[in-house]
Image (cartoon, helix red, strand yellow):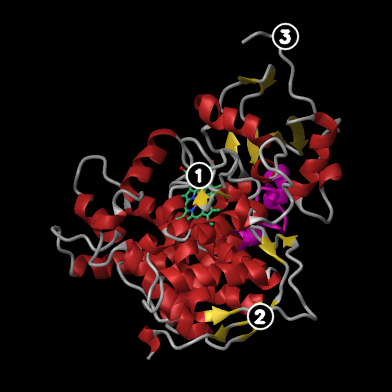
Amino acid sequence: MSIELKRPPGPRCWPIVGNLLQLSGSGMFYEKLNTLRKQHGDVVYIELGALKLVVLFGHEKVKKALTAQPDSFKYRPQWLVEISSFALFNGIVWSNGPLNEKLRRFAGPSVWPGLGDQTLEQRVQIEATALVMELTNQKGNSETLKTKFFQAISNINCAIIFGSRYEYSDAEFQEFSGLMDRLLQRQGINNPLNFIPILQYLPEGKKVKEMKVAIKKMCEFLAGKVKAARSTFDKSRARSLVDLYLSQEHEQDPVTEENVFHIVRDFFVAGTENVAIGLLWLIGYMVRYGEVQGKCRECIQKIVGDKSAPSQGDIKQMPYVEATVQEVLRLANIAPLSVPHATVEEAEFEGYSIPRETMVLTHLQSVHLDPAYWDDPEVFRPERFLRDGVLIQNEAYYPFSIGSRYCLAAKLAHMELTLIFTTLLKNFTFPSDASCIPTLKCTQPGAFVEPEVFNVTCNALTLSPLMK
Ligand code: HEM
């Protein structure tokens, strides 16, 4: 690489703290980064204490980094203290290279259809129906809804991993969900531990210790599941990912029980709360935009009719519903900064030099609001995804990211969102409370961006045949 290349532009970095002072305080981190973009352009360099960071904005730069230069940017940062306290760079999300590829193959979507007696679609339909039972005539706020959505999505993960679902009131399920919740609360790249590693030795380190206790309990939980599966295991008929693990444990270079623990953590941490929040955004938009809710329901009544459970085949025949889901995901930006990528070697990008061991953030929100690809980007308009009633693609739409680290379960997440959303609209109306219309403002209490709490009532339309 030419030695004349400069680092990307960015605000002045102060000794030791870097840009921490400019970027700390209230307000959301990804929004603050938008301000830096206005001053420095689409490739911005900042330092947060010990952490070097490059942020990429807009479709052109993000696409180029993830698809044209994957070898420079396909890595995850392996030096974050907070992440190392629980992820140990094992599992799918936080590993790199051959381990990531091996675990993606072992636990990825190509193996799911063969597990157990039910298809994935059936598993999602079962949870959607259970949700209808749970929510009938519920009146309250979106927090209650989020808890129920979380349980439904956890159950789909349990079915894939352990081969069975739980009743929502089951004590074991509740303990397991509690452990997952504790892991989730610790997530976040803007955790001070990542910028000021010395903090791990101060009293703040207590949280890391609590985390390790939660992880130990999770390992024990999984060990119990593996033991139970072993006693009924039949090699010719894998029921779950745990069975798949058992079927290869004596092969050369097997996936280990430790790997499986980290995969389980990935599924729950990277694939539960975000889907639950996606559903929450969908309902929030429907309460706020009653007209769109009515149009979606009209399509659903026409295509799904009296059938008890909407199917993926039905979704294909309802482009307006699909367009509504896409439009909500575009504006909601549940994971606005995706998952951090990183350089392991110095990389050249757009005429700049990006130092080795720099964390690279792809600002997906800026892609979804990129004025070069979206008219009136801030406006909610499902029709933007339709031409003559047919669904059209926009290349600047990728809530699940793109490139080789693309979300492992994008198809499953999409199926969960569309089938559950459709089932809910088929069974309930979500009237707008004129005195308290959802603001649809973003808040970020944990790893993902969710809507400000709103009031919601689930008014049952008719009794679904499955409930009669
Ligand atoms: C609305 C729901 C979801 C959204 C918005 C979402 C989004 C994302 C994004 C943006 C990434 C990072 C891609 C990158 O680094 O370039 C990712 C990675 C990942 N997601 Fe999802 N995801 C969702 C649901 C799920 C579900 C349901 C699961 C599993 C059950 C899952 C498992 C994963 C895994 C394992 C990775 C890491 C892939 C890797 O690093 O190789 N996600 N997801």
Q: Which residues are magenta?
A: 185-208
Seen at 56% across and 66% down, the residue is 279
Residue 244 lies, with reference to residue 5, above or below; the image says below
Can residue 312 be seen in the rendering of this structure? yes
In this view of the protein, which residue sits in the foreground, 251 or 389? 389
Determine the image quadrant of residue 51.
Answer: top right
Q: Does the segment drawn in magenta span residue 186? A: yes
Of residues 444 and 430, the one drawn nearer to the viewer in this rendering:
430
Q: Is residue 176 visible?
A: no
What's the residue at 70%, 70% (across, down)?
288
Crowd tier of the residue under label 1, counting other residues whose Cα lies within 10 Å: few below 14, some 14–19, many 20 or above: many
Identify which residue is drawn at 60% across, 21% down. 347
**Which residue has dot 2 on it?**
431
Looking at marks 1 and 2 on the same chain, the residue that comes earlier in the sequence is marked by 1
- Front position in the image: 210 or 328: 328
Point out residue 60 in the picture as x, y percentages from the top left corner. 64, 30
Mark 3 lies on a secondary structure that is loop
Mark 3 — residue?
A: 4
Residue under circle 1?
Answer: 94
Which is closer to the viewer, label 1 or label 2? 2
Alpha carbon separation for disc pair 1 and 2: 42 Å
- Circle 2 residues within 10 Å: few <14, some 14–19, many ≥20: some
Of the numbered discs 1 and 3, the one sitting upstream in the chain is 3
- Asked which secondary structure carries label 1, the reply is loop
